[in-house]
């Protein structure tokens, strides 16, 4: 497998969509999903410019953080409250904030180290029982409710769309998320700095970008299929 070729191809596909939609060619951040990928392979990808890395599990993020330098780490998987303390000083962005109790825990540990932690609020737009995230209609009220947590900065929203062989079937979710993102940006709450709409993975990232995503999380298309999926 040619990791460099895969990275270059993803960047080209992203640029093609941006060109088609009239956006800047650098308007999307590519986060490489490194779940279950060995450190030597990740370092090879880093050497070819993949500098934003996403992990689903706290333990893997902590271990790889010590062995891979010069990158920004994203916590993209479900985050348990009792594991917050291990990553609060290591992540550039937490994508999976979805409850008041988790927000309070992040804030507590962030205050301890005097660091404001950037977060995305995860939305479960399709109300899938197997997925984390807030219901669509609860997202803005939730963000309003955490205004007093001074060591959290809400930077945007994250969506994991329903898995499908036909990305067109999830386009409405992406479109609705972009509207929610725009509404949130217009509200301009003091505890927010709305910049990132994280949606789109290997099977649907082009449709996500067409509908306004500016951060995609790609694993399989870079590193190949893994035993436990992306």
Image: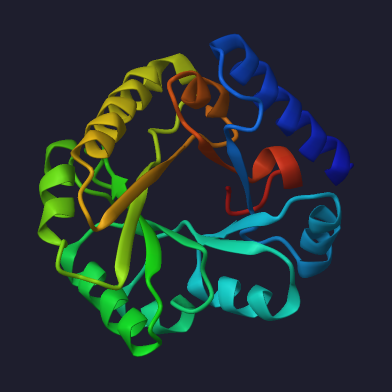
The answer to which quarter of the image holds residue 117 is bottom left
Whole-percent x, y for residue 151 in the image: 30, 73
User: Residue 154: in sight, yes or no?
Assistant: yes
- Closest to the observer: 41 or 104? 104
Where 126 falls versus 51 (above or below)? above
The answer to which quarter of the image holds residue 179 is top left
**Measuring 28% from the left and 43% from the top, which residue is drawn there?**
123
Whole-percent x, y for residue 19 in the image: 64, 14
Whole-percent x, y for residue 9 in the image: 78, 29
Q: Quadrant of the N terminus?
A: top right
User: Residue 131: in sight, yes or no?
Assistant: no
**Measuring 56% from the left and 20% from the top, which residue is drawn there?**
23
**Measuring 79% from the left and 57% from the top, which residue is drawn there?**
46
**Measuring 68% from the left and 17% from the top, which residue is drawn there?**
16
Where 86 falls versus 98 (above or below)? below
Q: Tell me: 61 left or right of 169.
A: right
State the residue lying farthest toward the top: 20
Whole-percent x, y for residue 35 in the image: 61, 59
- Closest to the observer: 228 or 104? 104
State the residue lying farthest toward the bottom: 112
Q: How is the image coloured?
A: rainbow
Q: Tell me: 7 left or right of 149.
A: right
Figure label count: 0
């Amino acid at each position: 497998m040619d990791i460099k070729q895969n990275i270059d191809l993803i960047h080209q596909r992203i640029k093609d969509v941006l060109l088609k939609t009239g956006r800047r060619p650098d308007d999307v951040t590519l986060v490489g999903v490194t779940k279950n990928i060995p450190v030597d392979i990740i370092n090879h990808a880093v050497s070819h410019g993949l500098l934003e890395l996403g992990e689903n599990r706290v333990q893997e993020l902590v271990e790889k953080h010590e062995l891979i330098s010069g990158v920004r780490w994203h916590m993209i998987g479900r985050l348990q409250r009792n594991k917050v303390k291990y990553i609060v000083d290591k992540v550039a962005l937490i994508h999976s904030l979805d409850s008041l109790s988790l927000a309070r825990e992040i804030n507590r540990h962030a205050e301890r180290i005097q660091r404001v932690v950037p977060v995305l609020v995860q939305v479960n737009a399709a109300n899938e029982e197997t997925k984390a995230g807030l219901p669509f209609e609860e997202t803005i009220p939730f963000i309003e409710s955490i205004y007093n947590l001074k060591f959290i900065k809400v930077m945007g929203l994250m969506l994991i769309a329903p898995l499908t062989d036909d990305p067109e079937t999830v386009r409405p979710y992406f479109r609705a998320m972009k509207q929610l993102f725009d509404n949130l940006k217009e509200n301009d709450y003091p505890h927010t700095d709305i910049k990132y709409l994280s949606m789109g993975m290997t099977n649907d990232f082009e449709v996500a970008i067409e509908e306004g995503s500016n951060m995609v999380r790609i694993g399989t298309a870079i590193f190949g299929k893994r035993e436990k999926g992306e």
